[in-house]
Image (cartoon, helix red, strand yellow):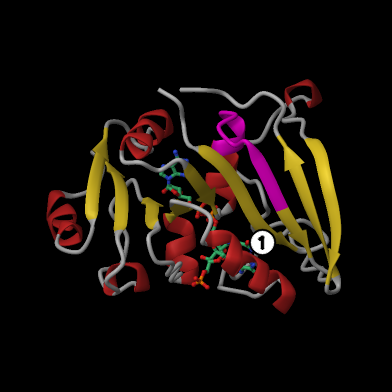
Amino acid sequence: MKKPYILINSALTLDGKISTKKRKKIKISSKEDFIRVKKLRKRFDGILVGIGTVLADDPKLNVENTLRIVLDSRGRIPLDSNLLEDELPVLVAITEKAPLSRVKRIEEKAEVIKFKGSKVDLKNLLKKLREKGIKKLLVEGGGTVNWSFLKNRYADEVCVYISNLIFGGKDAPTFVDGEGVKEKQDAIELKLKNVEKLGEGLLLFWELPHPKGL
Ligand SMILES: NC(=O)C1=CN([C@@H]2O[C@H](COP(=O)(O)OP(=O)(O)OC[C@H]3O[C@@H](n4cnc5c(N)ncnc54)[C@H](O)[C@@H]3O)[C@@H](O)[C@H]2O)C=CC1
Ligand SMILES: Nc1nc(O)c(N)c(N[C@@H]2O[C@H](COP(=O)(O)O)[C@@H](O)[C@H]2O)n1
């Protein structure tokens, strides 16, 4: 079974942050980049975010004919979140760590898929998404989710908007958080495909040389 084609898209400050240490929803993209992202989303069958992003940003990701997917191990998605309040489809991927009472409430508003363990099993999730007809998946973070997709080499391409802002601060989330590699030899090495100037920032397109199948 082939996995969906996966693009990670993110907006970074010049120092690699994707928010400030307050982890609130913040516009890092320029208006030109937001226009680009709006168009980009329409080209994908699914858009995936982590629960950290839902709790911080309360995203809408409201694109017709696109499945919104949330990695939410413990079923923490707020029942009044934008994703659960509109009529567009949402899939919440949970694990056995999610309390049953929560799961039932979420199921009233979204499709729920349950996985074993404490983190959503990406390999199995990607298999299920492909079976559902998701051929192209856009991953929009946050940093923990980006790490999982990169560490496992599931991402095919990466697109980052580098803005003209600097946030600083060791506690501000970065484009890729998670555990990270210990040695340089374990680094995830990408191939630069294109660079564009956009507003006051730069748009960088990268390719992963050997994305992993399922
Ligand atoms: N500037 C930008 O383009 C973006 C910025 N953000 C920012 O990122 C921050 C949120 O990032 P994070 O806290 O890192 O949260 P996140 O959005 O990456 O979600 C991580 C959570 O997802 C759940 N999860 C379940 N299975 C998982 C798996 N297999 N792999 C990874 N995670 C799994 C876990 O509960 C984990 O803690 C917010 O401050 C938000 O504003 C988020 C998206 C885009
Ligand atoms: N491309 C981009 N630029 C930024 O500056 C951002 N803060 C984000 N955030 C991502 O977009 C989601 C919000 O989407 P809606 O506008 O609510 O549809 C947010 O959750 C992040 O995934 N992206």
**Count of marks overlaid on the render:** 1
Q: Bounds of the magenta span?
A: 149-159
Taking the spot 33% from the left edge, 45% from the top edge, the residue there is: 73
Q: Amino acid at mark 1?
A: Ile
Residue 4 is a magenta residue: no
Q: Residue furthest bottom?
A: 31
Ligand 1 closer than 8 Å to the CB at disc 1?
A: yes
Q: Residues within 10 Å of mark 1 (few under 14, many from 20)?
A: many
Query: What residue is at 36 percent from the left and 73 percent from the top?
Result: 82
Front residue of 197 and 147: 197
Residue at image position (75%, 60%) is 161
Q: Nearer the viewer, residue 77 or 171?
A: 77
Q: Position of residue 57 (x, y in %)?
A: 49, 70
Q: Looking at the image, can residue 37 be seen?
A: yes
Q: Is residue 40 above or below residue 186?
A: below
Mark 1 — residue? Answer: 18
156 is within the stretch colored magenta: yes
Q: Nearer the viewer, residue 32 or 71?
A: 32
Residue 20 visible in the picture: no
Image-based side of 134 in relation to 131, left or right: right
Q: Which quadrant of the rendered structure holds the N terminus?
A: top left
- Residue 163 is situated, as x and y percent measured from the top left of the image, at 80, 67
Q: Position of residue 169 (x, y in %)?
A: 75, 62
| Horizontal side of residue 136 vs 93, given as left or right | right
The location of residue 65, given as percent across then percent down, is 37, 60
